Image (cartoon, rainbow, N blue to C red):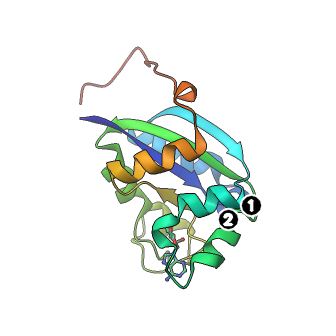
Amino acid sequence: MTERTLVLLKPDAVKRRLIGRIISRLEDKGLKVVALKFMQMTHDQAENHYSVHRSKPFFKDLVSYITSGPIVAMVLEGPKAIEVVRLMAGSTDGSKAQPGTIRGDFSMGIEKNIIHASDSPEAYSHEMPIFFNESEIVEWSYGDEIIY
Ligand code: CMP
């Protein structure tokens, strides 16, 4: 079933000039970009985005980190997109993430872990409107779609 997921390339990915390489991996897999934005998150957006972690001891640092520099926000579409991107991202802690995953290949940290991806349809519904209006999501077709 085709679904959508919200993906962020975090400030460490941008500062390390990894935007292109990570988007290439996601496109190579077969995910379609249907919205894309380069931006700096506000404090309010960050607190809202990470509201499920509000009670965690790392919440304050997480908000200050994600607002510390520009990010890339995107909506990707594809069959089981949420599960597929989570698998590609790898374990949250980059030092434990499998080589071959994005975090496994590019991160040694748990805070500076390169990428965020929605972990459920409910999370997508909460996260996506923080970054995009519904009208900014473009329905389009490659014209040579692979039959999944
Ligand atoms: P992300 O997928 O963006 O979702 C929540 C983020 O919280 C997670 O990636 C990590 O960057 C961060 N995080 C999770 N656990 C910890 C932790 N124990 N210490 C610091 N940051 C954490």
Amino acid type, callout 1: Lys
Vertical side of 50 occupied by 140: above or below: above
Number of residues whose C-alpha sits closer than 10 Å to that of mark 2, classed few (under 14), some (14–19) or many (20 or more): many
Asked if residue 108 is positioned above or below residue 128 in the image, the reply reads: below
Q: Residue 13 placed where, x, y %?
A: 65, 60
Label 1 packing within 10 angstroms: few (<14), some (14-19), many (20+): few
Asked if disc 2 is less than 8 Å from ligand 1, the answer is: no
Element at badge 1?
Answer: helix
Residue 100 horizontal side relative to residue 134, left or right: left
Q: Quadrant of residue 52?
A: bottom left
* Front residue (pair 138, 25): 138
Is the Cβ of the residue at disc 1 closer than 8 Å to that at disc 2?
yes
Any part of residue 118 in sight = yes
**Gap between marks 1 and 2 measured at Cα:** 5 Å
Which residue lies under the disc numbered 1? 15
Q: Residue at x 68, y 70 (%)?
A: 65
**What number is the disc on residue 127?**
none
Judge whether residue 31 can be spotted in this image: no
Q: Which residue is mark 2?
A: 12
Q: In which quadrant of the rendered view does residue 70 lie?
A: bottom right
